[in-house]
Amino acid sequence: MTVTDAARTAAPLPPLAARATDVGGSPVRDILAVTARPEVINFAGGLPAPGLFDREGIAAAYRAVLDETPERALQYSTTEGEPALRAALAARTTVRGLATDADEVLVTTGSQQALSLLATALIEPGDTVLVENPCYLAALQVFAFAGARVLPVPGDAVGLDPEALDELVARERPKLLYTVPTFQNPTGRTLPADRRAAVAATAARHGVWLIEDDPYGELRFEGERVPWIASYPGAEDRTVLLGSFSKVMAPGLRLGWLRAPELLLRACAVAKQAADLHTPTVNQLAAARYLADGDLDAHVARVASVYGERRDTMLAGLPDALPAGSTWSRPEGGMFLWVRLPEEYDATALLPEVVRHDVAYVPGAPFHAADPDRATLRLCYVTQTPDEIAEGLRRLRRGLNS
């Protein structure tokens, strides 16, 4: 038999795992691929403004690490993370109101990996997971990939409804609640302190894990900081707090972390060993050096000031850009605002025409775990300059009206 004959008679390969075919890709990534043309003003992405990266400070940190400790920087590291970085993260968390030891911190390859590790450690196929409505898209993907039954918690303009949450927890007995309570993706809303206390109390009363994701919390333009849910009574032994350098330092570093109770942190460390052994050593040491030598808080304050100006530009232009009867959020920080068009509009169906006018947004439907609201969309206001935002909104008006 020739090689060609063998190829013709070869048996078909086994199929992919069901979870690999049942869970789709990210609609945001798909949209970004379509709108990659440089002439498109892209309000769809969740990308920090590249012109604001502290390139010199980050480069100096890498140079110092590679000049002074090259053997360590280029070597394998521990799964839990470099001690210097864990200590620095614990100190920053403590200063912000949540007493934390380095041993309570696990460094991850971006906070997205933290979500995947938690899904591996906590979720069995068929387990119930509660999420906000709407919810961060990539979290919905992670939970679907783990085989979870995902249910949305009803809410309003400031976040999830604690009474509805309590009723849902009592009825459905979920394994965990996932929330982005500060400058939420996609809505930009912030859960008030009294509701955070109620969420902590519900978790304590019913026995539920809380995953509190906080990638945007330091990007505040106005108003007063609201304490983490993890700091409220009842949440101490059941809350995982996620953080990231992606929005405050640079996403290319791929550095995130989770703060968790000992038992769960250990399970996540085992899951991480199976995933990637450890987060790149050189990136961790450079971040630790940056924190030691630089002033991240001052850098974040500069970034937040610029982002606040860009938010104001977008808010000022929305009344002329959107159809009469539209409503939108006014975030106190973060990167996104949420728009609801009049009932007869379908943001998904309108997007191709809008893109033809060289501007883009993300339709709101994919952010819903159930019953998508097709009249909604998400706008990111941080990547473009004020002039580009103003021009993008003019294009958006033409696209929506064509």
Image: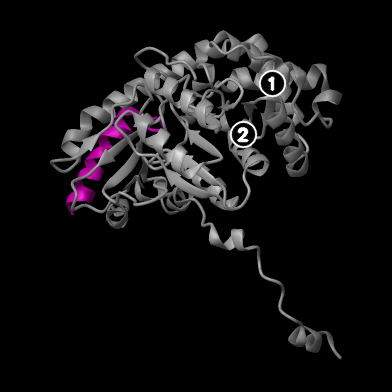
Quarter of the N terminus within the rendering = bottom right
User: Which image quadrant is residue 277 in?
Assistant: top right
Q: Which residue does the image show at 39% across and 18% down from the upper left?
A: 193
State which region is magenta.
382-402
Amino acid at circle 1: Glu
**Magenta includes 387?**
yes
Magenta span: predominant SS is: helix
Q: Position of residue 222 (x, y in %)?
A: 34, 15
**Is residue 49 found left or right of 356 in the rendered image?**
right
Q: Which residue does the image show at 59% across and 15% down from the upper left?
A: 93
**Which one is nearer the viewer's eye here, 155 or 45?**
155
Disc 1 target residue? 104
How crowded pointer 1 is (Cα within 10 Å; few <14, some 14-19, many 20+) is rated as some
Q: CA distance from mark 1 to mark 2?
A: 17 Å
Identify the element where label 2 is drawn: loop
Looking at the image, tell me whether mark 1 or mark 2 is earlier in sequence order: 1
Mark number, residue 171? none
Q: Is residue 42 above or below residue 252?
A: below
What's the image's color scheme? one colour
**Magenta includes 278?**
no
How crowded pointer 2 is (Cα within 10 Å; few <14, some 14-19, many 20+) is rated as many
Q: Position of residue 189 (x, y in %)?
A: 35, 28
Disc 2 target residue? 110
Identify the element where label 1 is drawn: helix
Q: Position of residue 255 (x, y in %)?
A: 63, 29
**Which one is nearer the viewer's eye here, 351 or 24?**
24
Q: Is residue 332 visible?
A: yes
